[in-house]
Image: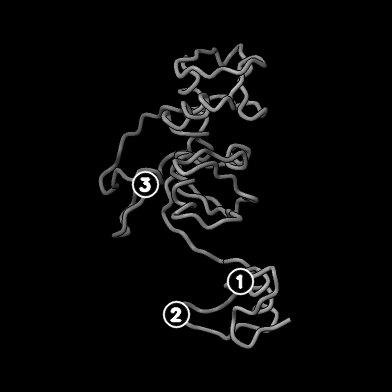
Amino acid sequence: MRVSKILAQAGLASRRGAEALLEAGRVTINGVVRREPGAQADPATDTIALDGRPVGAREAHAYVLLHKPPGYVTSLRDPEGRRVVTDLVPAGTPRVFGPRDLDRWRRGVTLPDGPAVPSAVRILSHGKASTWLSVTFREGRYREVKRYCKALGHPVMRLRRVQFGPLRLGTLPLGRTRALTAGELERLQNLLDPGGSPILPGIRR
């Protein structure tokens, strides 16, 4: 099997992104760097590594026959609130996000604008059709969270930003504002200008 396909199935990059990883010399097969786009490997017997970290096995799949009853919509969710077929899928069926996927989420992926590796990922809650995750990135690239989730095969259904730098949303109600505290302003000042020159009015060391 082509190594680029193995990397893509492991959720580490798109097929094109995987070929770029090979060309950059970041992929080894049994300890040997392979750069050619058409490099082949057997995931069952060969040791494949990206930046020295072993690539996990191919994601498990399950095939289920469902006799759809009337009134159910063939979709993951329905904005009109109708019942969806995923409500009928037994709990524990592969492809529903679970704790075993966390290692893959924490390894990171390569996006078109470079590697993306979260500093923290944890499960907040999960159900039959969706899972709430807390994902933390140290940088704020364009639509990074949505692109990261999509690359791993889990498109975002709803996104809520709860912290930006030193600023936490906390219990602030939807549509409301509050004044920043002195501590928040100072931490923001330090973040914007580590050299000490005042950028925000009235904030000095």
User: Residues under labels 1 and 3: Cα distance?
Assistant: 31 Å
Percent across and percent down for residue 25 are 57, 24
Up-down: is 89 above or below 54? below
Q: Which mark is residue 175?
A: 2
Residue at x-position 61% and y-position 20%: 28
Q: Which residue is mark 3?
A: 76
- Amino acid carrying mark 1 in the image: Arg
Which one is nearer the viewer's eye here, 162 or 189? 189
Q: Nearer the viewer, mark 2 or mark 3?
A: 2
**Label 2, label 3: how far apart the Cα atoms are:** 29 Å
Classify residue 117 by image quadrant: top right
Which residue is the site of mark 1? 168
Q: Amino acid at mark 2?
A: Gly
The mark closer to the camera, 1 or 3, is 1
Query: Residue 168 appears at what percent x and percent y?
Result: 61, 71
Question: Image quadrant for the C terminus?
Answer: bottom right
Mark toward the viewer: 2 or 1: 1
Q: Residue at x 50, y 35 (%)?
A: 93
Q: Can I make out residue 19 in this image?
A: yes
